[in-house]
Image (spheres, rainbow, N blue to C red):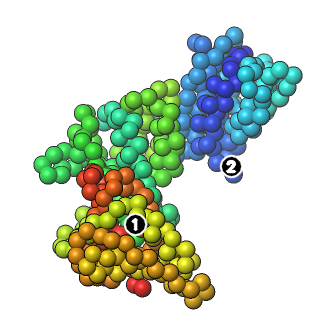
Amino acid sequence: MKLSIERAALLRSLNHVQSVVERRNTIPILANVLIKAENGALSMATTDMDLEINESVAANVQEPGATTAPAHTLHDIVRKLPDGQDVEIALNPEGTQMTVKAGRSQFKLSCLPVADFPEIGAGNLPAGFAVPAADLRALIDRTKFAMSTEETRYYLNGIYVHETEHDGVKVLRAVATDGHRLARFEMPLPEGATGMPGVIIPRKAIGEVRKLIDEAGDSIQISLSESKIRFAFDHIVLTSKLIDGTFPDYQRVIPEGNDKIVEIDAKTLTSAVDRVSTISDGKSRAVKISLHGKHMTISASSAESGSATEEVEVNGETDIEIGFNAKYLLDITSQIEGEGCRLTLADAASPTIIQDNSDPSALYVLMPLRV
């Protein structure tokens, strides 16, 4: 194998693929990137056995071939090379060592056999549809913060994506919850998604897809089965195993009898909660919201720091006192892009619904705290 490639193009691709590789690996081959050079292109793939990224980039291939080399080491080398240089990559005849040259710099990396590299990307993925990049970005951003990190409830460590109906219209819905808050987002069902299985996409796959969306074209092709999902970007294919579990009946968490409604400017609420929570207890981050008529008082106190209050005006008149975890509340209000934010409450012990007045596609549920 012998090829040359522009340093910027190589670094961009390595940035994408090396992030899948775990820093601590007990299986040596999983620390490596699979490199293939043929037909005027360099393709690179990495995997952690649950997730695989494969990317192709144009290169000047003098001799086709394939090998595997340490992913993070190769990335660090290319990252530190001067910009604007061409990088030459060559494999020795024995296939045991890869030489990386640029200008006066030369590196020799130990290689492992291509046959040892596992591939999870193969397999039949019967359901397939295209999603606009902007819609997929919104789907992830509006829900990912509510994913659980508890390993015991592994089935909550991702976003549940499924086909359903809302007001007689078929939609693609995404839901995430950690038991303290719930985020739901929906968009019109893409053509070809009818009959797709409901799937739980793992948090690591969500993170990698989100990074790639910003560099993607207008549309992203999604293919999936009961056990795997694949996202195809311009020259990048990301394949991930799905979480093998049953997502809970989230509809039961969304209250239907809440009758106290107030509206407030989202940025005003976010700023006020952020300021007051500076004083809140470090562990629970509790803030108390007191609604009296057209006034909302946000307060917090802690034995060590003291207390804080701030008053803001709201639309709608109701009397209620309720406590929330400030971080969870801020995670939700920061997702609201419109000016108006609606809180639908019942009492101090019941979940509250929070929505963007100008965007009905997203709905958030927040459990209260006792304060």
Mark 2 and mark 1 in contact? Answer it, CB < 8 Å.
no
Instruction: Tell me the mark number nearer the camera, choosing from 2 and 1.
Output: 1
Question: Where does label 2 land, which residue?
Answer: 23
Q: Is residue 152 visible?
A: no
Q: Residue at x 50, y 33 (%)?
A: 215
Q: Amino acid at mark 1?
A: Leu
**Label 2 vs label 1: CA separation?**
40 Å
Q: Amino acid at mark 2?
A: Arg
Q: Is residue 252 visible?
A: yes
Residue 97 lies left or right of residue 198; in this view the side is: right
Is label 1 in a helix, a strand or a loop? Answer: helix
Residue placed furthest toward the left: 168
Image quadrant holding the N terminus, namely: top right
Q: Nearer the viewer, residue 365 or 129?
A: 365
Task: Assess disc 1: are there few (<14), some (14-19) or many (≥20) residues with their C-alpha within 10 Å of its C-alpha.
Answer: many
Residue placed furthest toward the bottom: 303
Q: What percent of the width, then of the height, locates residue 145? A: 45, 58
Q: Residue at x 42, y 50 (%)?
A: 141
Question: Where does label 1 land, which residue?
Answer: 269
Residue placed furthest toward the top: 62
Residue 98 lies left or right of residue 233; in this view the side is: right
Mark 2 or mark 1: whose residue is earlier in sequence = 2
Q: Nearer the viewer, residue 275 or 105?
A: 275
Q: What percent of the width, then of the height, locates residue 213? A: 47, 37
